[in-house]
Image (cartoon, coloured by chain):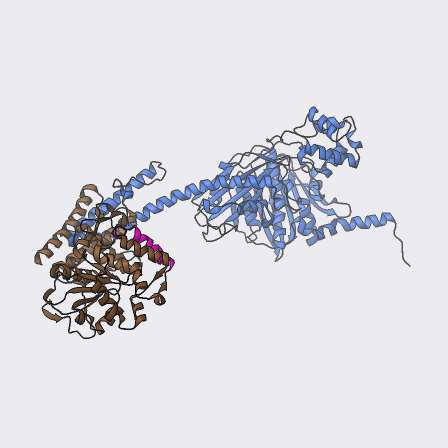
Amino acid sequence: MIMAKTAEELAALQKEISISEFFEKNKHLLGFDNPTKALMMAVKEAVDNSLDACEEAGILPEISVKLKSVSEDRFIVTVHDNGPGIVKEQVPKIFGKLLYGSKFHRLRQSRGQQGIGISAVVLYSQLTTGKPTRIWAKTNTQKKATYVELVIDTLKNEPKIVKDEEVESPIKDSGVIVSIELTGRYRKVQGIDDYLKQTSIANPYARITFTASDGVKTIFPRSVNELPKQPKEMLPHPYGIEFGILLRMLASSKSRTLATFIANDFSSTGAQSAKDICVAAKLDTQKIPSSLMREEIDALLSAMQRAKIQRPPLDCLSPIGGKELEKSMKKEYPSSEFAIAVTREPSVYRGNPFQIEVGIAYGGDLKSDEQMTILRFANRVPLMYQAGACATMEAIKEIEWKRYGLQQSGNNMPVGPVILVIHMASAWVPFVSESKEAIAPYPDIIKEMKLSIQDAGRQLSRYLSGKRRTGDQQRRLQIFERYSVEMATALHVLTGKDEKDILKKLKEIIENRNRLKEASQKAGDTGEEVAPLAVGEEKGEEE
Amino acid sequence: MADEIKETKRKLAEMGEKVIVTLNEEGSPSIDIPLRTLSNVVFDKKTKQLVLGDKSAKRYFFNVAHSKKFMQTMMVGSFCKSLLDESIHASIRDMYYNLKRTLPDSNENTFDEQSESDPLIVDIEVALDTLREHLHLTTDRKGIVAGNVVIRDRGDEINWGKLGSGGWSIPSTVDEISFEKVDAEFVLVVEKNAGFERLHEDKFWQKNKCILIGTGGQPSRGTRLLIQRLNKEHKLPVYVFTDSDSYGFYIYSVIKSGSISLAHVSDRIATPEAKFLGLTVSDIYKYNLQKAIIKAKEVDIKRAKELLQYEWFNKNPRWVKEINLMIEKGVKAEIEALSHRGLKFMSEEYLPDKLRSKDFLD
């Protein structure tokens, strides 16, 4: 006999399916599509949280990452930071509830926008190993640490606390330790090592140590000792708004009328623009925001996007900074012979302020017959996968690299001993997909990226042509030296003069020329050619 | 001859001294080499010869573009000095091999091709106002001669009329030969060896009392000097017989006025009195050779138009007419085209007819 299920029972069943099955089905979208990446994601989510927390609390980050191998494909990742810690009540919500966070409801340049969150890692851990996640959190030197072991109740999307106690901990003043066991694979390339190295480049004020499962410790030291200025929060700009967000904003607004809603809940709007928008949308300015019907919201949205409104404020951005980026590139690539970084002025795409930074490291151990290495960042977070879909690649391919002294065939990636860093800072980085690994190719963004690359490229080509000149000069002198011996012999045969004297004289002049060159370089000369020895030297005409 | 050697040695030494002076006093060795481009070649109307102008270029050892050539020039100079010191001759190819070596600490050679050393000889000739022959450099023998002439060469007596089918190969240096007996009324210079063979076999030189010279294309310096000596020393008229095309005409002008590339030696090897016998373009029509013509190519026409730019052609209305006719008709003809009228037509009808009527171009 078939038992009929009630609607409530069906709903419960559906919900039960939803959270873990949704995760299973969408692993790739969330970034857990391969075991190497899964391991890296665990480190990334924890480290991103640590960095955000430290910055907000004004603490220079000191983060240690430890990897312990349980079996060939099972690891324990432990991340320990010196941040402000987390108050006891918040711990379960942050780690045990998907889509929970302070970042979702505000517009502010932060790393958090870049991932699915630490709770997804917790879920992945419990789905692959069945183990709870362990968290130590300490907010005050005087207090003991809170120790929590938890899993996620996949039925309710709620944290389920396994253990909860006050303990002594290795945390010195304040901070968090999170320890997660999960299946994965450890590989250096596009794994934890690359992620931490790149994180260190984009966060030069952080000190990060990594202890691999074989006990080998890698230290990524600070290259600057100051925290960047904190980005300000901003209200959404009418040009960047989407239907869903507008709907939510209308529903939760504290403004009593549509006019005040437009004027107060958005950036760059005022009473006049609010009125203009209402007129254009054929809506009453006195309407209660939450009462708008679907068609009315559509009209409002399109009126907002057509209205003449000033660009948003730009102080919500916190770039790495040209000098800082340059320093950290020199630190991470100490053998490179040249490093330069530029920070463009902020710009706006669809109402969202953004800023592009580009750094170039050249030469040294870098291979000159391979494609250049491209490191992509969004809000200081390394983007390590899906390069092909990223706006950065489009920008790079549109550059004529030959102009900057590199090889490039057609529209392919340029070849040369170069590390190219591209960073986009924005309160809202547009990603092509939920895994948030490729920046969407908006024309405004690509344009700014190209301009930044060209800025840096010009400096590279200036350096290279200077180098070429020096090399040419060196080669020239070598040529003269090589020809001098035969010259001396021939002149001896012709005149009977002593061969050694002639050779000595020739070498003396070449030596002097070399010294002159070095002296001019030391004097900060631009590396231009030393004045020719003979007046009108280049005028000699040859058939 | 001994004076000549002494003088050339002095000039070579002087060239070296000058370089050493610039080295010691200016700290930058340099040398002046007269330019040998068309821009520095002028046609001397009086002597009807091409001569070198007075433009020159300085070569600097401490200039990357000049450095190697500078070294090479000095090497060629010193090689010639050694030849003169030891009183021996060498071919220009010998010289190339003798001077070719790898420079220290490199994989670069002093010379890679003979084409690098050859022009430097001319540079030195021009710079020192001397001749390759005086530098004791020889080239491959090129050109043949036959006729009723007896000469003395390095002590041996040679009869140009008793050398069977071959004739005498003209050496690169003919300064030192002396004429014992010259029994001829004119000199006929044929551009092609094939033409020479034809006329030699037909005993043309015997029947017409002339000296027959085959140049085998552009005449060598030895051949040109020999022509000049026969003209100057023995007052023999010189008639040039070439293909009816731009290259044939230019061969004639080289014999008569000298060449652009060797303008510095024109007065020593040109024969201003030489006259052009044929094959003219008009001859093609006059002697009914239309069936034996070749269609002129684009380069032929281009070269013909260049000839019209040369003073020594465009001052003579008959030459202008001939060249224009060629451009207009777009034709050219080889001397062998005369065989179209029978193998002996050349030696028994065409040439005697031309000589009789004195139908020459100047």
* The color chain B is rendered in: brown
Q: Hey, which quadrant is residue B326 in on the image?
A: bottom left
Q: Hey, which quadrant is residue B248 in on the image?
A: bottom left
Q: Is residue A129 above or below residue A304?
A: below
Left or right for B235, reference B352: left
Whether residue A171 can be seen here = no
Left or right for A473, reference A304: left
**In the foreground, A536 or B185:** B185
Residue A396 location in percent, x, y? 53, 46
Q: Most extreme residue toward the bottom, as rendered?
A: B164
Q: Where does the magenta region start and end?
A: B295-316
Residue A36 location in percent, x, y? 60, 53
Check if residue A206 falls in the magenta segment: no
Residue A490 location in percent, x, y? 19, 54
**In the foreground, B256 or A392:** B256
Q: Most extreme residue toward the right, as rendered?
A: A1
The C terminus of chain B sits in image quarter: bottom left
Left or right for A456, reference B347: right
For image coordinates 90% across by 57% down, the residue present is A2
**In the foreground, B156 or B334:** B334
Q: Is residue B195 above or below residue A468?
A: below
For image coordinates 27% across by 52% down, the residue present is B317
Residue B145 location in percent, x, y? 19, 68
Whether residue B272 can be seen here = yes
* The color chain A is rendered in: blue
Total marks in image: 0
The N terminus of chain B sits in image quarter: bottom left
